[in-house]
Image: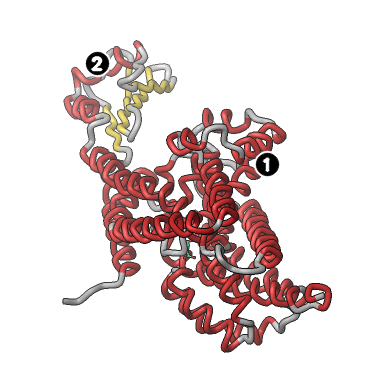
């Protein structure tokens, strides 16, 4: 039987969702009827508009004064109702519009699509915590039993954190510069904006530091507080490695087995993405119309430009001046891994190719490659970190109608860093992790539906950047390891 690759299925779901959503949007759009005959005394003309959220009555009296009355079923104005009642009595067409208010079939279909698409988002949420914990733990526990890794571990970690932070800063700079979410759509929710503004920078940073030391790790799991979960998992893993012996072996076996199961569940959930994308895109387009395409286009441009800057400028500079390698030659040597990463959108899946390319084509020692790369595939994801930061700021721009304040952008940066550390190296893992950041800054999770449509192509690009950064990390760690200082 013909099997269509998942990304084509997602694309098909997206196209179908766009078409259905646009039809619904047109069907649910404002309709108005102008009534000129049989009007109540003193009213010359009235227009009854049935829009997605209100009914508007406009009328001109014999003094040519124009009055607009808005009637909403939730808070009807007395004048509006009286006027409307008089109109409705005389014009059955207007009355029909009023009765249809809030119940239009198109709107209802849009709402149902949102609900069904929401089930898919719930599944993503369901897998996120166990996936983070098992992925992170298995990465850290794989270090146990290896001799003399202390110093190498320190350097690798510094490189990973530094490059991920640089990637996030690049992403934030570009998203603030290009403002993809502000290209077409105006403010939507002032109240959320106010809540977001209410905290000072020091409070925000201190709050994040507090979260890194959970007073109750089990409570952190149920809240859920992702920062605390990630912090405690790292602490647990590092100390399990220090305890060593059969303790760590047992924990590692259980963790690896659980991680395998979680990867299988996540892969199964991701298989539903075409259906999820269809419903979510339908819901988004039925309410926002085609204007969303423009924003989405700018969003793709922003993520791609930021990834390109990180991959083609920042990392090559580090490679040249710290790793002492020729960036072009090194990239050529790594090309099989980079292309596999691009086509598979999975750094874990690419790992065997990355390992062989690094050792056989780029001349990195097995000691460095076999340590830096498996750890990198789990915790070093520059592309994912950058993408998370841009995506969340884009969502905030769309939802609030303006940029998040600096204090909130810092929260986004910190959580994006942790989300990238916790993300598994499988397709769309970054999407699963985004829940963490959206929650941290109080943005609605449903907004993820908008970016789902273009996630696959961005996933391919960010996975290549993830693998490229891991490979550059090998050169950097190797350069330090072979320096005379280090060997003395
Ligand atoms: N697919 C990416 C990887 O495997 C993770 C992500 O979704 O960002 O590296």
Q: Is residue 407 visible?
A: yes
Q: Is residue 57 above or below residue 171?
A: above
The answer to whether residue 83 is left or right of residue 137 is left
From the top left corner, tell me how far across and down residue 261 is, in percent: 33, 58
Is the C terminus in the top left, top right, bottom left or bottom right quadrant?
bottom right
Residue at horizontal 70 percent and vertical 76 percent from the top: 478
Is the N terminus in the top left, top right, bottom left or bottom right quadrant?
bottom left
- Check disc 1 and report the residue beneath it: 406
| Crowdedness near tag 1: few (<14), some (14–19) or many (≥20) residues, C-alpha within 10 Å | few
From the top left corner, tell me how far across and down residue 475 is, in percent: 68, 77
Q: Is residue 129 above or below residue 462?
A: above
Residue nearest the viewer, comparing 357 with 481: 481
From the top left corner, tell me how far across and down residue 405 is, in percent: 65, 39
Residue at horizontal 50 percent and vertical 38 percent from the top: 225
Q: Is residue 180 visible?
A: no
- Check disc 2 and report the residue beneath it: 85
The answer to whether residue 8 is left or right of residue 463 is left
Q: Is residue 455 above or below residue 479?
A: above
Residue nearest the viewer, comparing 138 with 271: 138
Q: Secondary structure at mark 1?
A: helix
Q: Is residue 480 above or below residue 281?
A: below
Q: Looking at the image, is mark 1 or mark 2 earlier in the sequence? A: 2
Q: Secondary structure at mark 2?
A: helix
| Crowdedness near tag 2: few (<14), some (14–19) or many (≥20) residues, C-alpha within 10 Å | some
The image quarter containing residue 85 is: top left
């Amino acid at each position: 039987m013909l099997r269509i690759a998942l990304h084509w299925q997602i694309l098909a779901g997206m196209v179908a969702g766009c078409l259905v959503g646009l039809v619904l949007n047109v069907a649910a759009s404002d309709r108005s009827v102008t009534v000129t005959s049989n009007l109540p005394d003193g009213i010359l003309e009235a227009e009854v508009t049935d829009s997605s959220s209100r009914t508007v009555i406009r009328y001109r009296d014999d003094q040519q004064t124009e009055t607009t009355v808005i009637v909403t079923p939730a808070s009807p104005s007395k004048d509006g109702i009286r006027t409307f009642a008089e109109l409705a009595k005389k014009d059955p067409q207007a009355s029909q519009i009023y009765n249809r208010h809030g119940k239009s079939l198109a709107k209802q279909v849009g709402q149902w699509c949102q609900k069904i698409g929401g089930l898919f988002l719930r599944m993503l949420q369901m897998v996120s915590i166990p996936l983070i914990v098992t992925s992170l733990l298995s990465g850290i526990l794989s270090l146990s039993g290896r001799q003399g890794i202390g110093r190498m571990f320190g350097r690798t970690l510094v490189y990973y954190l530094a490059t991920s932070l640089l990637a996030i800063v690049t992403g934030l700079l570009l998203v603030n510069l290009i403002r993809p979410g502000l290209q077409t759509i105006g403010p939507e929710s002032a109240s959320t904006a106010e809540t977001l503004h209410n905290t000072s920078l020091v409070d925000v940073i201190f709050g994040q530091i507090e979260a890194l030391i959970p007073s109750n790790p089990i409570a952190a799991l149920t809240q859920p507080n992702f920062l605390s979960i990630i912090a405690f998992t790292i602490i647990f893993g590092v100390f399990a490695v220090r305890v060593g012996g059969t303790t760590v072996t047992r924990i590692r076996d259980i963790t690896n087995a659980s991680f395998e199961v979680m990867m299988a569940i996540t892969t199964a959930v991701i298989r539903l993405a075409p259906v999820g994308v269809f419903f979510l895109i339908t819901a988004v387009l039925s309410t926002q119309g085609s204007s969303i395409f423009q924003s989405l286009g700018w969003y793709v441009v922003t993520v791609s430009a930021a990834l390109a800057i990180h991959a083609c400028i920042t990392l090559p500079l580090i490679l040249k001046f710290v790793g002492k390698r020729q960036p072009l030659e090194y990239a050529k040597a790594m090309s099989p891994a980079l292309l596999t990463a691009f086509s598979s959108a999975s750094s874990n899946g690419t790992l065997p190719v990355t390992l062989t390319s690094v050792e056989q084509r780029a001349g990195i020692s097995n000691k460095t490659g076999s340590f830096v790369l498996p750890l990198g595939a789990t915790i070093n994801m520059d592309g994912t970190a950058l993408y998370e930061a841009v995506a969340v700021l884009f969502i905030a721009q769309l939802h609030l109608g303006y940029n998040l304040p600096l204090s909130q952008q810092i929260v986004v940066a910190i959580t994006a860093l942790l989300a990238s550390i916790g993300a598994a190296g499988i397709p769309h893992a970054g999407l699963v992790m985004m829940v963490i950041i959206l929650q941290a800054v109080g943005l609605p999770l449903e907004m993820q539906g908008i970016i789902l449509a273009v996630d696959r192509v961005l996933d391919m690009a960010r996975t290549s950047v993830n693998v490229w950064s891991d490979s550059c990390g090998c050169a950097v760690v190797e350069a330090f390891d072979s320096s005379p200082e280090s060997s003395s």
